[in-house]
Amino acid sequence: MPEPDSLAQALERLDGVTRRLRVECPWDREQDARSIVPHTVEEAYELAEAALSGDDEAMRDELGDVLFQVVFLSLLLEERGEGDLAAVATQLTEKLIRRHPHVYPPEDATGAEIETADDVRRQWDEIKSGVEGRTAEKDWKKPGIPALIYANKIQWKLDPAEKPANAGAGNPDQQADQAEVGRLLWEAVEKARSRGIDPELALRAEAESRASELNDRK
């Protein structure tokens, strides 16, 4: 692994390389947000695979690929006069501070005590709808994420006990249960295929139907 630069130096150098590629590389010149985003999604999956494998070298490599996507897409925003990497980082930082008042309490803080991860999740939802004014449709229309992830998110929100999506993380029989669930999902895909149904689209449609219940709660 090469000797790392300071954070500022490393990001400045990456920004410079990205800008040069945008001008001098024929492939990079042709890209826009629509053409580059499929690569962004692919890189995100490869990063997830590296993180789950426990391979730190692979994780560094894939983090770099994802970071390039962020820098490149930010450059596209800059070209349209709609922001730049600094604006993206600033907006993200402000959002993180706003959504963590238990860490960055405002002067007039009177919120509930936050002790658990579930408390944080509930607080996020309150901030999104109350402070940020996010609509139900924006929260639950997620066409860009896979149907299984989407369905998992909707089921968690529909659960009256508000169990977190990883509620089974402490399950002592997790390995056996994972194998059983994997078999059930395999059988569901097999049944869908035998009937000429795309399982991804079928689950997406069902999750969207269930999400309407969340809209009714708003």
Image (cartoon, grey):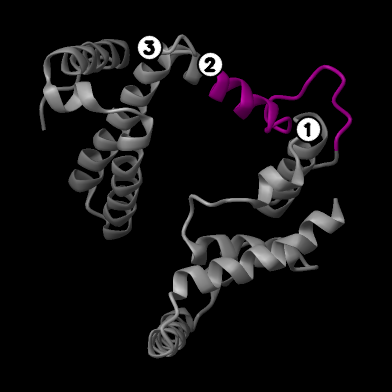
The span picked out in magenta is: 90-111
Q: Residues within 10 Å of mark 2 (few under 14, many from 20)?
A: few
Which quadrant holds the N terminus?
top left
Q: Position of residue 195 (x, y in %)?
A: 44, 89
Q: Earlier in the sequence, mark 2 or mark 3?
A: 3
Closer to viewer: mark 2 or mark 1 = 1
Label annotation for residue 90: 2
Q: Amino acid at mark 3?
A: Glu
Residue under the point 59% across and 68% down: 205
Label annotation for residue 133: 1
Residue under the point 46% across and 9% down: 81
Q: Amino acid at mark 1?
A: Gly
Q: Earlier in the sequence, mark 1 or mark 3?
A: 3
Give SS at disc 2: helix
Whether residue 163 is visible: no
Quickly name the residue at label 3: 79
